[in-house]
Amino acid sequence: MRVDDKYIQSFVDRHDYDVRKSHNARFTDQKCIPDVVCAVAECIIEFISDDVNKVFTKNDVWHSDYANNLLAECFTKPDTENESMSSEYDKFFAQPMKMFAAAGILDENKVNRANSYHVREYEILKYISLREKNALTFLDIYLTKVMKDSGCMPFFDRFFKEQDKKSLDSLRDKLMSLIKEYTPIKRNYEPPRIYNKIINVMAFRRRKKGVVKGMLSDFPLTIDEIRYNRVNWRDVDKPKGVSRQEYASTIDNEVKDYAGYFERSVNQAKKFVRDLEQYSEVHHYPACTATDAHHIFMKSEYPDLADMPENIIALTGTEHYTYAHPNRNTQRTDPDYQMVCLISKLDSIERNFQNGNDDYSLADFTKVLNEGLNTDEFNEQLGYEGIKARILKFLRPY
């Protein structure tokens, strides 16, 4: 079973999420943002292992060794047993689980005053756990359906079209009314904590302005604005006259406190590509089973590209250590084979799109090209053939 945007859309279309009927205040919440939702899904998947019928509670997942390690390494948070963090961790795990239950991904039951859960839609939960982008995709599709069912979508449409304070105030008034009138939440301070997250997730996916510090943002939102881990190494601009190596060092300093989060993002991207591409992306036939995930532009030199699947290609061991890294020297790449990898990756992206999928982003691939080749020649408007022609120009400049 393949989970993608269409599968999730079909799933949510089978549900009526009208808050006016359900009166469920926890259809989403303050901590229901992409990196947290992805992390909690990952912790649940790890906790239940292969037993999809396993019953668990928030505390089971919260106090697991896997969750403790993930929070420490990827979110730079204290031990999950730290009493001073009890309230924060309760929200961190409970709120996404309540949302998963509201969406129909988990089944929720009350046992001795505590909520217990078991997984109803394992494949969707697994999809969400694989990478932050998947969690973002799910949140946008799900929240859009909730807003449509609850009669709020015209207010979102107006805001995304007009992008001004008046349309934002109108949208927030509508959401305040929805939450206070149809759910048990009655205090004025709580709804903004919820609805600003909804607005921002939906705005980011549409490349629109959102809400920053309670005000209409000046520009379309960056991913950093909808993260719990508010760090984005891609926002560190390389000054002119600074070498790639010096820039890499600068980024390393910027994110050194988030090294675990960075490594997790990179490993998720590599696993994503390995799961997606069964055979070598250079040869594409069964005799060439892919075993390695190779960074086309090296992680050590291009850390800002390291967690992008568009910069990672599935290769055989021989291709990886004989051609991509001659003589198994992983400190250098063969420039000619690098071009072969770029063209092969472009073919994979095109094939994926032609099959009706959107696992890759052509726009992100052009970012990889512009950054890695130190140019601004590439954009998605060129199309696949136009991009390929320009890659070949870099391979044969004369």
Image (cartoon, rainbow, N blue to C red):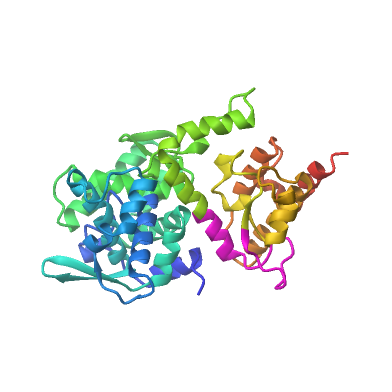
Residue lying at 45% horizontally and 36% vertically, measured from the top left: 255
| Front residue of 242 and 187 | 242
The magenta stretch spans residue 11: no
Q: Which residues are magenta?
A: 268-292
Q: Is residue 33 visible?
A: no
Q: Is residue 87 above or below residue 97?
A: above
Whole-percent x, y for residue 309 in the image: 58, 53
**Main secondary structure of the magenta stretch:** loop
Residue 44, quarter of the rendered image: bottom left
Q: Is residue 215 above or below residue 78?
A: above
| Front residue of 266 and 171 | 266
Q: Is residue 235 left or right of residue 52?
A: right
Whole-percent x, y for residue 147 in the image: 34, 57
Residue lying at 38% horizontally and 60% vertically, measured from the top left: 42
The magenta stretch spans residue 289: yes
Q: Is residue 248 above or below residue 16?
A: above
Q: Residue furthest left?
A: 112
